[in-house]
């Protein structure tokens, strides 16, 4: 931080591909810090009154992405500091969202391999982008499309494939302390 510039709100924002552990890590961080957790996908489901898969099926991905952007703008405007925010995997697709995320606090990209995503999501029917016959192809395509967007948004990247949730949480807490002390 440069002298005179405002410090970012002391939120921790988790981004990453579906199955990267954002919601689980957010719960761990919430417990460790005592900060409330907010999950943008859960807010959308609550507002829409239906699961994400139904939003995709009935209204389309573009409508879901608009709901996602609206929720994010509202959080930026009204959210006090000291929250853990778990986001949807595609929230970084819009440049305005990437800018908001960085303003909201310390952004951590939970990096996960395509193979690990398959393992973590194989029993889920709640992921509309993977409801097809070639999940690995879809995952690789989406990872290729999003990788640089995640990187441009994040203050920190953490490779999660070989780490436990407590190890990831500890790494985020140490990095956040450094980030907020600058």
Image: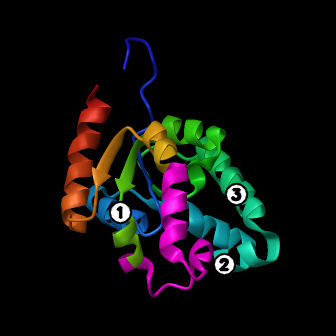
The residue wearing badge 3 is: 65
Label 3, residues with CA under 10 Å away: few <14, some 14-19, many ≥20:
some
Q: Is residue 57 left or right of residue 178?
A: right
Task: List x then y, in percent, for residue 150.
Answer: 47, 46
Q: Which residues are magenta?
A: 119-146
**Secondary structure under badge 3?**
helix
Q: Is residue 177 left or right of residue 97?
A: left
**Secondary structure under badge 1?**
loop
Say which residue appears at 63% left-offset and 39% top-offset.
95
Real-space Cα separation, disc 1 to disc 2, in angstroms: 23 Å
Q: Is residue 128 left or right of residue 122?
A: right
Task: List x then y, in percent, for residue 125.
Answer: 56, 85
Say which residue appears at 30% left-offset and 65% top-offset.
28
The residue wearing badge 2 is: 53
Real-space Cα separation, disc 3 to disc 1, in angstroms: 24 Å
Q: Which mark is residue 113?
A: 1
User: From the viewer's perspective, is the residue at label 3 or at label 1 nearer?
Assistant: 1
Q: Are marks 3 and 1 in contact (CB under 8 Å)?
A: no
Mark with earlier residue (1, 2)? 2
Task: Examine the rendered structure and indicate whether residue 96 appears above or below residue 172.
Answer: above
Mark with earlier residue (2, 3)? 2
Quarter placement of the C terminus:
top left
Mark with earlier residue (3, 1)? 3
Residue at the far right: name it: 59
Task: Examine the rendered structure and indicate whether residue 75 appears above or below residue 47.
Answer: above
The secondary structure making up most of the magenta span is helix
Q: Nearer the viewer, residue 153 or 144?
A: 144
Q: Is residue 162 on the magenta stretch?
A: no
Residue at the far top: name it: 3
Q: Which mark is residue 177?
A: none
Real-space Cα separation, disc 2 to disc 3, in angstroms: 13 Å
């Amino acid at each position: 931080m440069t002298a005179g510039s405002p410090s970012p709100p002391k939120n921790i924002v988790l981004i990453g591909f579906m199955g990267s552990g954002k919601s689980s890590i957010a719960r761990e961080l919430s417990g460790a810090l005592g900060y409330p957790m907010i999950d943008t996908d859960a807010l959308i489901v609550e507002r829409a009154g239906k699961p994400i898969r139904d939003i995709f099926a009935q209204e389309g991905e573009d409508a879901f992405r608009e709901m996602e952007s609206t929720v994010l703008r509202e959080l930026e405007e009204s959210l006090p500091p000291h929250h853990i925010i778990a986001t949807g995997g595609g929230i970084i697709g819009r440049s305005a969202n990437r800018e908001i995320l960085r303003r909201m606090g310390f952004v951590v990209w939970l990096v996960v391999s395509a193979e690990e995503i398959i393992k973590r999501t194989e029993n889920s029917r709640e992921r509309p982008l993977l409801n097809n016959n070639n999940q690995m192809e879809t995952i690789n395509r989406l990872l290729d499309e999003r990788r640089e967007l995640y990187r441009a948004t994040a203050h920190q990247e953490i490779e999660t494939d070989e780490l436990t949730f407590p190890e990831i949480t500890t790494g985020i807490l140490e990095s956040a302390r450094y980030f907020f002390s600058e």
